[in-house]
Amino acid sequence: MKTLTFGLSLIRHGETQHNKDGLLQGQAIDSPLSETGLQQAEAAGCYLKDVEFSNVFSSNMLRAQQTAETIMKHNHSCSALQLVCDPLLKEKSFGIAEGRPVQDVREMAEAAGQSFPGFTPPKGETQEQVKERVKGFLEKTLQQIGAQHWRDGGEGETTSSSSAPSAASPAEGRADEGVRGVPVHALVVTHGAYMCAAVRFFVEELGCSSPPGSDREHMFALSPNAGLSRFVLTVRREEGRFRLSAMRCVFVHRMGRGGAFKSWS
């Protein structure tokens, strides 16, 4: 069967002053990156500078856009690409807790017998609502990337990007791990709680496989600022629509210290 395989790299925005101060931002507080956050975005851009991207998406919130623009500035394949800002990628709404210390919300969650960031404060988004946004973005992206990159061919043929890349990297921690030789590769810049919901949805409902040596607790953890997670998706076309056939996680929460990225998977 003819298929299309493409990479999907999710990265959390760099640090903001609210992150540094331990305050929740959510959707109501549209903070810029702090000096440290700008340095993290620069480090991510330098790390990814030679990785091929065919599409770049970002939350429409300032901290994510700044991170995306900084990464694109360094990347040779992004010079001709347009940054697509999508409100489906914005952070989870924490309702009345936005602007309050994260520790306060952790205590609220504990009192309710729940965990953070899955806990929903009054007037905030539920995990189910965030998951619906994740599903909506993924479906839209599958259709867009399929329409842009699918190549017509005879029955049984494959597109040039459908050969599944090796699960093992020749050098642990290399920036193109899992997507080397895969010309279709989307970069998505988003937020911490949103990424938690996305990874959980990928694993629990889409059957996404985990990286070797990585358990669910690690995969479902909150990504650090500028933390990078990568997935490889295989798509088929049925009745004029593109549908997900398989998905695997290459690594999660890869992050940089002093500009050098390291694998946590």
Image (cartoon, rainbow, N blue to C red):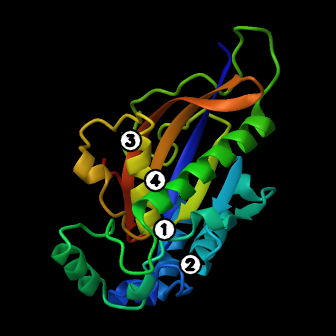
- Between disc 2 and disc 3, whose residue precedes? 2
The residue sitting at 53% across, 83% down in the picture is: 33
Give the vertical position of 127 relative to 207 (above or below): below
Question: Looking at the rendering, which quadrant does residue 71 occupy?
Answer: bottom right
Residue 172 or residue 3, whichever sits in front: 3
Q: Earlier in the sequence, mark 1 or mark 4?
A: 1
Residue on which the image places disc 3: 203
Q: CA distance from mark 1 to mark 3?
A: 18 Å
**Quadrant housing residue 110:** bottom left
Residue underneath mark 1: 191
Which residue is labeled 2 in the image?
A: 63
Element carrying mark 4: helix
Mark 2 to mark 3 CA distance (whole Å): 27 Å
Q: Earlier in the sequence, mark 4 or mark 2?
A: 2
Q: Can residue 227 be seen in the rendering of this structure?
A: no
Of the pair 140 and 79, the residue shown nearer to us: 140
At label 2, the amino acid type is Arg
Q: Residue sitting at 24 percent across and 39 percent down?
A: 213
Q: Position of residue 100 (x, y in %)?
A: 35, 91
Where's the N terminus, which quadrant?
Answer: top right
Looking at the image, is mark 2 or mark 3 nearer the viewer? 3
Q: Earlier in the sequence, mark 1 or mark 2?
A: 2
